[in-house]
Image (spheres, coloured by chain):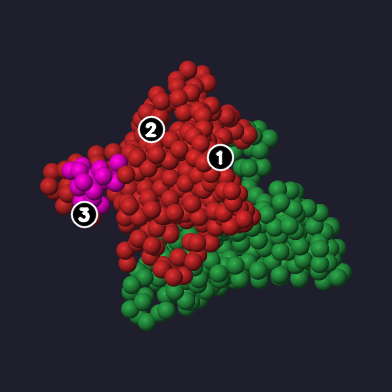
Chain colours: A red, B green
């Protein structure tokens, strides 16, 4: 079967990869947006946290017989705790300074984390087996859907929408949004804003680690997997604007799909298509698709 | 009044001493090493023009350094042009690229500016990596140094050094003059208070763009020269690590100081040279640690700290 002269199985599998990438873009840009909202810094080490998540899963499985499902919970908790420590000891000192220092500090942290893992594990990457419960294919007629890939999309989207629900519909989310608008007044109302900030940073990087565990069986577990991804995510953030949670999700998924389609039609352009779209958006709508002002 | 003339005198003295040092340095220190420092010193100074004096953080300056290196290499190696035309071509190409980057990135400010320049530079990286004539992962190898103006053989390391030194001094002079011109005053005004500069009637975006193009072109000048020195344009020059490195050099040396970026570049290049054999891939970790320390406890940088010390002792 063919669609526009392209074998449907090829198109289908590339769209699926696009959707997976898109859901990673969504989770990561979501985390960046939440952190930026409250801390006013762009977390350059977000990619490194994603990579750490994947490595926690891999190390757990290889050395400690910790299975996939445990890792899916454990990695975000551990990386989130690391985030809490980093926020308490370092980031905290920068809130009164120019936003750019936060970017520079987290860039340095990313270099440190990546450098350590590159020294330990090289750059060739490690494989991570798909968990037993999720192996196999689901025949869809026009293509066979690998069960695990379907799971990644569902799990990632569930987390995205869960986060959206938490921020938009719960009391904690209301504090968070209020803190983003005006931290002084929220503090005056008796809410522990520094604690809220620490929690937010921990939660943001935990999201990245969760994506990392999901990614481990699909892509190779590689020390550089995060830094290659994070720059694309920055472009995604510029395209979507950081003002809206739902905007981050929609932009991330959409760009992942477009990237997947490009891989089929014109593979050479697939690595730059997101950047090209960013240029277009900057020309037409500089504030970003969902940005204010 | 008296202090300013004193300062001017001191500054002139510092410049004179440094200039002479640069002239005799290749008789004491290995010239290729010095040339590397000068190329990165010019690169970091050009970067500092933007971050230190306009307050714009570009995280994509590797694109200008690298692209100019490739353009220069292709012009000299494949089109058979003379080295001076190769350098000129690389510089112009970087200036044009800077104009494009600037036009796009200036539409957003602050943190977005950094992300946009980073993304655009990554795009340049992918294009360079995939283009048929750039040699992919191997880079552009075997670029001949050629004869400057047709009669100065640049294969002689000493001739090459003085060419690099002349280029560095010229580039440094351009930056110095830019900072100390009325134009530079307006740039500083934009850095300090952009709304105020707008209300005074300055077309802020135009000034930013012009500063961006100068910075990009001078980064390109450094990159093109570097290609001739090492006879190689490599993919690592376009990589985002390089964009981070130039931020680090500037920060370590002293943001917004005249000599800071040069001092920072010399420190980092020396460190990398010394460490490369001893610690291998830990170099990245060490760079990261320096980065974190600079941001947390050493924000004025080396030259900034020295200036603060002098100022304090002057008051007492």
Verify whether residue B1 appears in magenta: no
Residue B312 percent across, percent down from the top left: 39, 55
Residue A249 percent across, percent down from the top left: 37, 50
Residue at horizontal 39 percent and vertical 39 percent from the top: A154
On the picture, is B143 further left or further right than A111? right
Above or below residue A221? Residue A227 is: below
Q: Which residue is mark 1?
A: A224
Residue at horizontal 38 percent and vertical 58 percent from the top: A241
Decide if residue A283 is in sight here: yes
Same chain shared by disc 1 and disc 3? yes
Q: Are marks 1 and 3 in contact (CB under 8 Å)?
A: no
The local secondary structure at tag 1 comes to loop
Question: Of tags 1 and 3, which is closer to the observer?
Answer: 1
Residue A182 - label = 3
Question: Of tags 2 and 3, which is closer to the observer?
Answer: 2
Spatial separation of the CA atoms under disc 1 and disc 2: 19 Å
Quarter holding the N terminus of chain B is: bottom left
Residue at horizontal 83 percent and vertical 67 percent from the top: B80
Give the chain of mark 3: A
On the picture, is A52 further left or further right than A10? left
Give the chain of mark 1: A
Quarter where residue B273 is shown: top right
Q: Which residue is mark 2?
A: A76
Decide if residue B313 is in sight here: no
Residue A180 percent across, percent down from the top left: 25, 52
Which residues are the magenta region? A162-180
> What is the total number of numbered labels drawn onto the structure image?
3
């Amino acid at each position: 079967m063919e669609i526009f002269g392209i074998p449907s199985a090829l198109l289908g599998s590339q769209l699926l990869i696009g959707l997976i990438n898109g859901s990673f873009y969504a989770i990561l840009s979501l985390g960046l947006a939440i952190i930026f909202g409250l801390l006013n810094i762009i977390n350059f080490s977000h990619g490194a946290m994603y990579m750490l998540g994947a490595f926690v899963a891999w190390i757990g499985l290889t050395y400690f017989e910790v299975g996939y499902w445990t890792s899916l919970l454990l990695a975000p908790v551990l990386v989130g705790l690391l985030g809490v420590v980093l926020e308490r000891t370092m980031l905290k000192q920068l809130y009164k300074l120019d936003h750019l220092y936060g970017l520079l500090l987290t860039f340095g942290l990313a270099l440190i984390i990546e450098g350590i893992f590159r020294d330990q594990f090289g750059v060739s990457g490690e494989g991570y087996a798909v968990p037993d419960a999720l192996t196999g294919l689901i025949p869809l007629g026009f293509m066979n859907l690998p069960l695990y890939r379907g799971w990644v999309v569902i799990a990632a989207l569930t987390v995205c929408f869960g986060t959206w629900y938490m921020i938009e519909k719960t009391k904690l989310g209301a504090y968070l949004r209020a803190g983003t608008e005006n931290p002084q007044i929220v503090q005056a109302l008796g809410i522990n804003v520094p604690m809220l900030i620490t929690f937010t940073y921990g939660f943001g990087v935990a999201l990245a680690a969760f994506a990392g565990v999901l990614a481990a069986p699909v892509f190779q577990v590689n020390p550089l997997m995060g830094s290659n991804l994070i720059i694309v995510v920055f472009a995604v953030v510029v395209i979507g604007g950081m003002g809206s949670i739902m905007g981050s999700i929609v932009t991330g998924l959409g760009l992942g799909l477009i990237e997947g389609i490009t891989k089929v039609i014109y593979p050479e352009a697939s690595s730059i298509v997101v950047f090209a779209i960013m240029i277009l958006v900057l020309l037409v709508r500089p504030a970003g698709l969902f940005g204010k002002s | 009044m008296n202090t300013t003339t004193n300062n001017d005198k001191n500054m002139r003295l510092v410049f004179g001493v440094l200039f002479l040092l640069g002239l005799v340095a290749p008789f004491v220190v290995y010239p290729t090493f010095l040339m590397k420092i000068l190329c990165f010193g010019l690169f970091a100074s050009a970067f500092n023009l933007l971050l230190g004096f306009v307050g714009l953080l570009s995280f994509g300056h590797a694109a200008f350094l690298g692209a100019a290196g490739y353009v220069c290499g292709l012009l000299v190696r494949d089109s058979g042009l003379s080295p001076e035309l190769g350098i000129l071509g690389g510089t112009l190409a970087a200036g044009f690229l800077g104009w494009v980057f600037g036009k796009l990135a200036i539409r957003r400010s602050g943190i977005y500016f950094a992300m946009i320049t980073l993304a655009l530079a990554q795009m340049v990286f992918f294009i360079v990596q995939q283009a048929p004539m750039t040699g992919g992962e191997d880079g552009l190898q075997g670029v001949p140094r050629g004869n400057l103006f047709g009669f100065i053989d640049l294969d002689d390391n000493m001739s090459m050094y003085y060419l690099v030194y002349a280029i560095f001094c010229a580039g440094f002079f351009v930056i110095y003059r830019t900072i100390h011109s009325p134009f530079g005053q307006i740039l500083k005004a934009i850095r300090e208070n952009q709304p105020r500069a707008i209300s005074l009637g300055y077309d802020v975006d135009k000034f930013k763009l012009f500063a961006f193009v100068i910075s990009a072109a001078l980064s390109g000048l450094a990159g093109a020269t570097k290609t001739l020195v090492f006879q190689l344009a490599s993919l690592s020059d376009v990589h985002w690590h390089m964009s981070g490195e130039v931020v680090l050099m500037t920060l370590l040396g002293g943001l917004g100081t005249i000599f800071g970026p040069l001092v920072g570049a010399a420190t980092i290049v020396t460190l990398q040279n010394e460490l490369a054999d001893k610690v291998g891939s830990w170099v990245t970790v060490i760079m990261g640690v320096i980065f974190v320390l600079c941001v947390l406890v050493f924000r004025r940088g080396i030259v900034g700290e020295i200036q603060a010390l002098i100022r304090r002792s002057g008051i007492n």
